[in-house]
Image: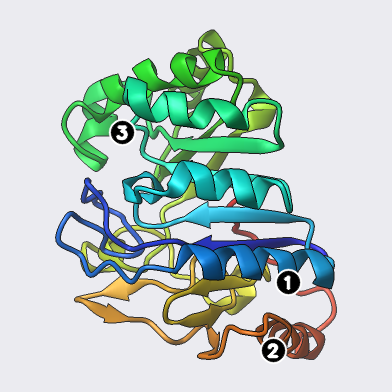
Amino acid sequence: MAGRLWLYTNYHCNLACTYCLTESAPRARRRLLDPEVAVELAREAAALGFTSLGITGGEPFLLPRLPELLRQLAGILPLVVLSNATLFTDRLLARLTPLAGMDVAVQISLDSAEAEVNDGLRAEHNFAAVIAAIPRLRDIGLRVRIATTAEHLGDQARARLCALHRSLGVGDEDHVVRPVVRRGRAAGRGMGVPVTAADLPAELTITADGAFWSPFGPTVRDGRLDTDLLLTRTTRPLSLPAAAMLRVVEGRPPGEDASLGIR
């Protein structure tokens, strides 16, 4: 089964972004995925033919064992780990140094080239933290990707943002722009575009709560988990939710292509 397997390591975060899919925040329920389970899922994914892993949350780098877990996972499949880039202290960067040379990318959220716009969506001083973190991650040999989530990004704003990430050594191939999705905290604020399974790519996603159709699936609104994109509560062996996803894919009409994704 080709494609990327997504793992939600946790749901809590040190930020509370306006459009967060999972209503993540410092006091959000953690919903931790056990690291040993994550490694076993990665091994099963490789055996099933998955080609890469995605690690997301919450903020994954809040987990004390994450650097060592990433090294284990990267030894099984190429991976991308999503982050808000606010936690990269000297000590954490030193623990990430063994990942240099491995097929690992750190995908950092940056929504505008203007600090006030970015920070209004994410958190005060977030822009400065991101701009400081990118060269430090690159200096220790890690690939950095930039993810921009925006409701409206005009040509001039996009050009300024692209000029910024290029100046930081991040090429266009490592910049993804995606819309705000009307799920999670964004739904409560009336932000973003409504989506259904037909709009989302089939990317099997595992959390502590079950297996979902897409990394946009295990969202939280008003403290309650959305289950409209839940495939199975069972996640092990991975072949069971993978088979459930294949049944759904095979049942979709020909030519029904998804238009949104996280990469």
Seen at 33% across and 63% down, the residue is: 11
| Gap between marks 3 and 1 measured at Cα | 30 Å
Instruction: Report if the CB atoms under discs 3 and 1 are less than 8 Å apart.
Output: no
Instruction: Check the picture and name the quadrant holding the N terminus.
Output: bottom right
| In front: label 3 or label 1 | 1
- Asked which secondary structure carries label 3, the reply is loop
Q: Which residue is mark 2?
A: 240
User: Which type of secondary structure does the marked residue at label 2 adopt?
Assistant: helix
Q: Is residue 182 left or right of residue 79?
A: left
Question: Which three-letter amino acid code belongs to the residue tagged 1?
Answer: Glu
Viewer-side residue, 145 vs 89: 89
Q: CA distance from mark 2 to mark 1?
A: 11 Å
Q: In the picture shown, does residue 259 fall above or below 178?
A: below
**Among the 4 quarters of the image, the one containing residue 250:** bottom right
Instruction: Write the residue at 55% across / 90% down.
Output: 234
Name which of mark 2 and mark 1 comes first in the sequence: 1
Residue 33: mark in rendering: none
Q: Tell me the crowding category of disc 1: few under 14, some 14 to 19, or many 20 or more residues within 10 angstroms, Cα based.
A: some
Q: Residue at 41% x, 54% y: name it.
A: 180
State the count of labels. Answer: 3
Reading the image, the residue beneath label 3 is 87
SS of the residue under disc 1: helix
Q: Amino acid at mark 3?
A: Leu
Q: Position of residue 78 (x, y in %)?
A: 72, 46
Q: Is residue 263 visible?
A: no
Most foreground residue, 140 or 119: 140
Q: Which residue is mark 1?
A: 44
